[in-house]
Amino acid sequence: MLTQTAFLLLAAVILIPLAKRVGLGAVLGYLVAGVLLGPWGLGVIRDVEAILHFGEFGVVLLLFVIGLELRPSRLWVLRRPVFGLGSLQVGLTALALAALAMAFGLDAKAAVVIGLGGAMSSTAMVLQSLAERNQLSDRHGRDAFAILLFQDMAVIPVLAVLPLLGGGGADFAPLRMLGAAAAIAGVVLAGRVLLRPVFTWIATLGSRETFTAAALLVVIATTLLMEGVGLSASLGAFLAGVVLADSEYRHELEADLDPFKGLLLGVFFMAVGMGANLGLLVEAPGVVVGLAACLIALKLLVVFVVGRGVGRSAGSARKLAIALAQGGEFAFVVFQLAGQQRLLDAEVIDAVTVAVTISMLLWPLLFLFEERVLARIFRTAQPRPFDRIRAQGNPVIIAGFGRVGQIVARVLALKRIAFTVLEADPQQVDYVRRFGNEVYFGDASRPDLLRAAGAADAHLFVLAIDDVEASLRTADVVRRHFPDLAVIARARNRYHAYKLMDLGVEAPIRETWHGSLALAEDLLGRLGVPQAEARRTVERFASHDEASLKRQHAIYQDEAKLVASVQQAREELRSLFERDEAELDGGETRTESVG
């Protein structure tokens, strides 16, 4: 076992950085490593089943960490996409695959089994790949997460249906449903009542190892409980994470478990690659590849139709369909259980299992094809036209309607001050319009759109664009074409502020500046510094830093001079505070002596 583990780690060390360097992503790297090490590759590892079971704990930890990041209030907000999109995807995909199976000559029961198993996607692969690309917060990423969550919850009814299809266990399904409900209620209750006090007590011990061990124990105990009542282990881990999402130990739990999660997920993906029966692929390549292609094509079509049917844009629906186009690890469980119930023949099980595995192996390439080819084709061939702007004469124009722009707009609306909003991200435009915001899709760096928005007559231009390059490009256009229009700009950092000042934007506001000052003042107060003194300290620091910013703007492109100026400013600030403290101490001494 140690030898096999050594080869697994060696493959991860060599192949994963290589896969990332060429843009293939870690998931595909792990899958390729598994194929090379497995029985149909170099044959280094033969006991694939043991590796797979070991790696499945990585999926469990992934769902636990995701649960930690999803507060119950946010989960309630997701109820519509979870049960709406999820039920549509699973139901329609299962029907389509069942119909295809019957067309190949299988009976109705076998077709239902294949439809239910094939409708599921790989939670681990999808979430890991979306996280790698920072797409979990995108529209298609949120929809994919909701559908995958529903798939995990659909495990229990699917497993309950199989014995009924096999002709046994007529009263098994109600008992399993009851046991599942009791287990879920037990996890929620225990999490609310017991886990927080337990972690509070462990935290007082000051032992990080004990804290990590307790976190792993919670995950393992929850998954064992869920598996005991026939539920998905990943669903149990997810519930445990959601219960602890409001805990003050959420971030520490996530940090402690993250290394285990990443390593075990890699083992799981390699095990999937090892399990690919390439021998069957050699014997009947047309059948296996055809089944895998049919699975991917049907899932692409159904999920795209579902996405468009619920109002998603064509691009978002396409990305969602590609994200869920592969088969999932749960299909292996369904097909094996169906074999035990004599619903599927051994030959059929081997064929559909390899087809699902191949779909999982091919999926990262499909994901890459969408990013490298399809996204560019559709972006070039079908650009969305900018909106026709009708709002003119408003005193304020806001460019960028993200975190900063939305807050500015809400404050202006409270004071009944009219404004015009321009946003260049079509997905963001569609999203904020759902909440009743009036936003125009347009690039604020285009002079013709600025004129249409009334920039020639406006009093203030709020530059709240998040992207630094787009922000600077817009500032340059505004200063050149509308020199009389005052610009209030948001800067992401000090360097962005310097570049904006180069373009003639006076006093750009750094986005984390005021929040950091407020946090520092609150921190001093909690450390026992009197409120007046804390405020005076922060105000003095802010004044000195603003002056340094203006002074260093003239030399920021000369690194040597900038470093010297920063060091000088630090010494000036230290001397300033030492002088203030000396004056304050002297004043107190004189007061005491007079008294």
Image (tube, rainbow, N blue to C red):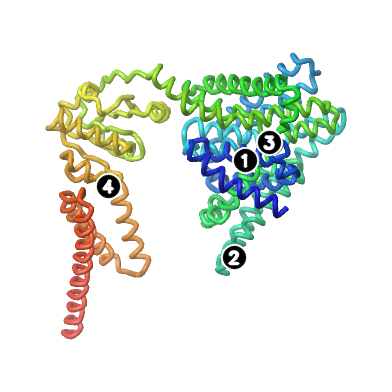
Residue shown at 32% from the left, 54% from the top? 516
Label 4 neighbourhood size at 10 Å, few (<14), some (14-19), many (20+)? some
Residue shown at 29% from the left, 34% from the top? 470
Report the disc number at residue 202. Answer: 2
**Amino acid of disc 1:** Ala
**Amino acid of disc 3:** Glu
The mark nearer the N terminus, 2 or 1, is 1
Q: Which dot, 4 or 3, sits closer to the camera?
A: 3
Q: CA distance from mark 4 to mark 1?
A: 46 Å
What residue does disc 3 label?
329
Image height check: is 218 above or below 449? below
What residue does disc 4 label?
510
The mark nearer the N terminus, 4 or 1, is 1
Label 3 neighbourhood size at 10 Å, few (<14), some (14-19), many (20+)? many
What residue does disc 1 label?
33
Q: Quadrant of the C terminus?
A: bottom left
Label 1 neighbourhood size at 10 Å, few (<14), some (14-19), many (20+)? many
Which residue is more in the foreground, 528 or 70? 70
The mark nearer the N terminus, 3 or 2, is 2
Note whether residue 407 is visible.
Answer: yes
Q: CA distance from mark 2 to mark 4?
A: 40 Å
Image height check: is 589 above or below 116? below
In percent of width and height, residue 230 lies at: 76, 41
In percent of width and height, residue 181 lies at: 71, 42
